Image (cartoon, rainbow, N blue to C red):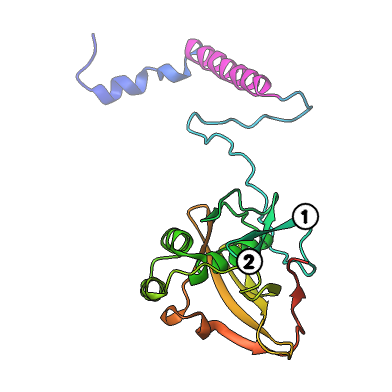
Amino acid sequence: MRSKNYQADYAEEPSPWTRPGFVLAAVLLLVILALGVVVAVQSRDDGKPGSVAPTVSAGSATPQPEPPGKLPTAVPVTAPAGVTWQVVRGTALPFSDRAGPREHSDKQAKGFARTPEGALIAAAQLVSRVGAAAGRASWQPTLTQQFLPSADRDTLQSALAAEPEQQAQPGDLAPLAGYLYVTYTPDTAVIGLAYRSVNGATARWFIVTTTLQWRDGDWKMVAPPGGAWTSLSRTVTDLNGVVEWGAR
């Protein structure tokens, strides 16, 4: 019969953790745990001695494809190859299978490559097609669809609408004579277009500085300040610094 002195009773009975049965069970448990660790490590072995394959959680992101290559930014320092010239509404315009335009008619030209050459051809095409001499059938869709919206564009549209309808004939307009890049990035291109003056015996050229921006998958033109191209034009007596380029 156990006494009422519980402290004395526990002192007299040996602790169950020190009994042989408990000690043997604890040893067996440690052995089983050790074997489980070895098996887990070996199951992740990638086949190389001493290596352990990394685990991947269920929430790991799927590998992404490699990013596309950088867009070209090297501007042509010689006249672009593979360009053909066609007379459109009184003036010769450039066309390229590589740089565009992909879609064109006597009214509009669209689909230019996002390259320096594509921006150059877009500038030459859009400036010519938005002139009053191109006629309303050309300048109106070109201006409303391929020029960025602005107050300057609205002013240019009003000025063109006030011009009498009289389409130019070959030889009436100043021909394209060359170009120069002011700045270029895949998003914005500032390009000077040189035209040979058709008036006067003295050789003269005027350079129109155009700005294009890449929007909605194509090059779009920025209208000139105040809607007047004269604000972006300067007259020169030689083509120093200009790459000669035009129909021959």
Q: How many marks?
A: 2
User: What type of secondary structure mainly makes up the magenta span?
Assistant: helix
How far, Cα to Cα, is label 1 from label 2? 19 Å
Report crowding for label 1: few under 14, some 14 to 19, many 20 or more residues within 10 A (C-alpha): few
User: Does dot 1 land on a helix, a strand or a loop?
Assistant: loop
Where is residue 211 drawn, in percent x and y? 55, 72
Amino acid type of the residue tagged 2 in the rendering = Thr
Task: Look at 53% across and 16% down and name the residue there.
Answer: 29
Where is residue 90 drawn, in percent x and y? 60, 65
Check if residue 26 falls in the magenta segment: yes
Q: Which residues are magenta?
A: 21-45
Check if residue 43 falls in the magenta segment: yes
Q: Is residue 134 left or right of residue 248?
A: left
* Residue in front for this viewpoint, 97 or 9: 97
Amino acid type of the residue tagged 1 in the rendering = Gly
Quarter of the image with the N terminus is: top left
Where, by quadrant of the figure, is residue 17 drawn? Answer: top left
Q: Earlier in the sequence, mark 1 or mark 2?
A: 1
Task: Tell me if residue 18 comes above or below residue 208 in the rendering.
Answer: above
Q: Is residue 242 left or right of residue 5?
A: right
Residue topped by disc 2: 91
User: Does dot 2 land on a helix, a strand or a loop?
Assistant: strand
Where is residue 95 drawn, in percent x and y? 67, 56
Task: Look at 47% across and 32% down and name the residue there.
Answer: 59
Q: Is residue 13 left or right of residue 186?
A: left
Task: Tell me if residue 69 comes above or below residue 183 in the rendering.
Answer: above
Which label number is shown at residue 82?
1
Q: Is residue 52 left or right of residue 213?
A: right
